């Protein structure tokens, strides 16, 4: 049961509002957005456009995280890993968090539309809507939510591209594909590690009712295998060269290897290793793509 918000010192409440934005996720969103912009932008680089893009995207991501926690406050209260979040712990009222989330989200979408371009603002608004209005409520009803949630999760680098060029080109879709397929093993590893907690919260994730893990492992390997050719698309469309091609190929095979390792043991330890591998994989592959293009 969600507790009533208690009276806290202003500094404490500021910290709680900051926690609502999920800073680590927002940072990841900003980094992938920056990668898309750097890959698509003509030279010399328009640094003011990049800063505007990152600011607007970060505002939307922060607002989406806050609204997600408002909607899921009751289920968060039943899960050990989320029970101490500001709303279920009673440190913030849902109404205040709602206003905060709406304000950030609206500011981000309008800022992108006005300071960057209309297309990027529109994609940002659609990403927000799909995350808050489709993915978040679907989590309590269907295991397909994981697949649906990968769509808004893959949008940031696409927004970086549109911010730089004003159009949805092949690079934007290639980056979208990389993020989409990468997210599935990443999310499934998290779902496996916290499967008991998710069951307590009432989320029908793929791993629930599948204690032995073969179904989860098959899904992980399927998406990791599909990620390999998708990650090579930047080379096919001429954005990157052979150094990126071979680097991405090796990284993809290594990532798949961690999925195979999980399939052989189905242990939380193997899932944690896979989760760490996923966190390492993404910035390296995007950084390699940016570096390869810069050196060509």
Image (spheres, rainbow, N blue to C red):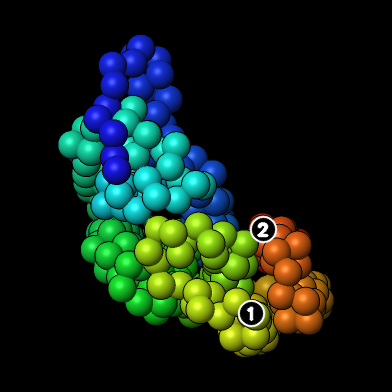
Q: Nearer the viewer, residue 58 or 280?
A: 280
Give the residue pinned by disc 1.
Answer: 213
Mark 1, secondary structure of its residue? loop
Number of other residues with Cα within 10 Å of mark 1, as a class: few under 14, some 14 to 19, many 20 or more: some
Quarter in which the N terminus is drawn: top left
- 73 sits left or right of 55 in the view: left
Q: Split into 4 quadrants, where in the image is the C terminus? A: bottom right
Identify the secondary structure beneath mark 2: helix
Quick check: 221 above or below 120?
Answer: below
User: Going by the image, does 132 lie left or right of 232?
Assistant: left
Residue 290, numbered label: none
Q: Which residue is mark 2?
A: 279
Say above or below: 111 vs 250. Answer: above
Visible residue check, residue 115: no
Q: Position of residue 218 (x, y in %)?
A: 63, 87
The residue drawn where x is 27% and y is 65% is: 137
Residue 112 x/y as whole percent:
30, 50
Considering only order in the chain, which callout, 1 or 2, is on the residue closer to the N terminus? Answer: 1
How far across and down, in percent of the image, does residue 71 sit?
26, 52
Residue at image position (45%, 51%) is 79
Badge 2 crowding class, 10 Å Cα cut-off, few under 14, some 14 to 19, many 20 or more, is some
Residue under the image location 47 percent in, 61 percent down = 198
| Tag nearer the camera, 2 or 1 | 1
- Residue 194 placement (x, y as % from top left): 56, 59
């Amino acid at each position: 049961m969600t507790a009533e918000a208690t009276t806290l010192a202003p500094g404490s409440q500021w910290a709680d509002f900051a926690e609502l934005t999920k800073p680590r996720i927002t940072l990841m969103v900003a980094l992938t957005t920056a990668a898309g912009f750097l890959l698509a932008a003509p030279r010399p680089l328009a640094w003011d456009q990049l800063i505007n893009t990152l600011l607007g995207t970060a505002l939307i991501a922060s607002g989406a995280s806050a609204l997600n926690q408002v909607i899921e406050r009751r289920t968060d209260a039943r899960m050990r890993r989320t029970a101490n979040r500001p709303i279920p712990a009673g440190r913030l009222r849902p109404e205040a968090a709602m206003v905060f989330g709406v304000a950030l989200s609206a500011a981000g979408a309008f800022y992108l539309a006005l300071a960057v371009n209309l297309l990027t603002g529109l994609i940002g608004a659609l990403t927000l809507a799909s995350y808050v209005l489709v993915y978040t409520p679907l989590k309590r009803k269907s295991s397909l939510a994981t697949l649906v949630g990968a769509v808004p999760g893959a949008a940031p680098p696409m927004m970086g591209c549109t911010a730089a060029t004003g159009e949805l080109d092949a690079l934007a879709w290639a980056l979208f594909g990389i993020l989409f397929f990468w997210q599935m093993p990443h999310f499934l590893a998290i779902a496996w590690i916290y499967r008991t907690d998710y069951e307590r919260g009432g989320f029908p994730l793929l791993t629930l009712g599948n204690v032995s893990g073969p179904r989860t492992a098959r899904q992980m390997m399927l998406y990791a295998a599909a990620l390999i050719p998708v990650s090579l698309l930047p080379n096919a469309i001429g954005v990157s060269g052979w150094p990126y091609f071979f680097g991405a190929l090796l990284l993809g095979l290594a990532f798949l290897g961690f999925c195979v390792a999980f399939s052989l043991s189905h242990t939380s330890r193997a899932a944690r290793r896979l989760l760490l591998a996923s966190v390492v994989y993404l910035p390296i592959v995007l950084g390699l793509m940016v570096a390869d293009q810069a050196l060509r």
